[in-house]
Image: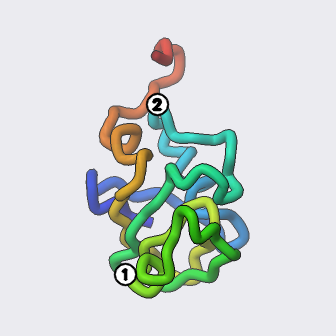
Amino acid sequence: MTLADTGESYACRGDESVLNGMARLGKRGIPVGCRGGGCGVCKVAVLSGSFRKRVMSRSHVSEDDEAHQRVLACCIFPEADLRLKVIGGLQKAVERPAVLPGQPQS
């Protein structure tokens, strides 16, 4: 997976959500509580690549969003390498530097 916002890449298995893989980047503020599509914070635009998806709430992902591959990272699973642009509330967390071991989290 590649984040277009920062150019960072991360590994993500086909049996895990794109959000779970993203969490390994060690960024402060990546939401880990919901992970089921209920909050809509992890909305991304898939710029390239293929994925399979679970059902997403229409309160967070409209039919137009889905048609244009604007989806929730917690509800998609990669089938090929993806290039993503973060468009939801997760964007600020993605732009922050990673948390290094032993570094205090804020």
> Is residue 72 shown above or below 53?
above
Q: Which mark is residue 30?
A: none
Q: What colour scheme was applied to this rendering of the protein?
A: rainbow
Spatial separation of the CA atoms under disc 2 and disc 1: 26 Å
Q: Does residue 44 lie above or below 55 as drawn?
A: above
Circle 2 is placed at which residue position? 28
Specify whether 83 is left or right of 78.
left
Q: In the image, what residue occupies the spot 44% across and 87% down?
A: 67
> In x, y percent, where is residue 100?
46, 25
Disc 2 vs disc 1: Cβ atoms closer than 8 Å? no
**Callout 2: 10 Å neighbours few (<14), some, many (20+)?**
some
Please say if 70 is above or below 51. Answer: above
Q: Which residue is drawn at 69% across and 75% down?
A: 54
Q: Name the residue under label 1.
A: 48
| Residue drawn at (46%, 16%) of the image | 106
Q: Callout 1, which amino acid?
A: Ser
Residue 37: image location, x then y, percent: 64, 59
User: Crowdedness of circle 1 by 10 Å Cα count: few (<14), some, many (20+)?
Assistant: some
Q: Is mark 2 on a helix, strand or loop?
A: loop
Nearer the observer, 89 or 27: 89
Query: Height in image: 66 above or below 100?
Result: below
Residue 18 rendering spot, x and y as whole percentages: 57, 62
**Residue 70 found in image quarter:** bottom left
Amino acid carrying mark 2 in the image: Arg
* SS class, disc 1: strand
- Looking at the image, the residue that sits furthest to the front is 59
Instruction: Left or right? Give the position of 37 relative to 99.
Output: right
- Estimate the x, y position of residue 11 in percent, counting from the top left: 53, 61
Name the image quarter holding the N terminus. Answer: bottom left
The disc, 2 or 1, on the residue closer to the chain's N-terminal end is 2
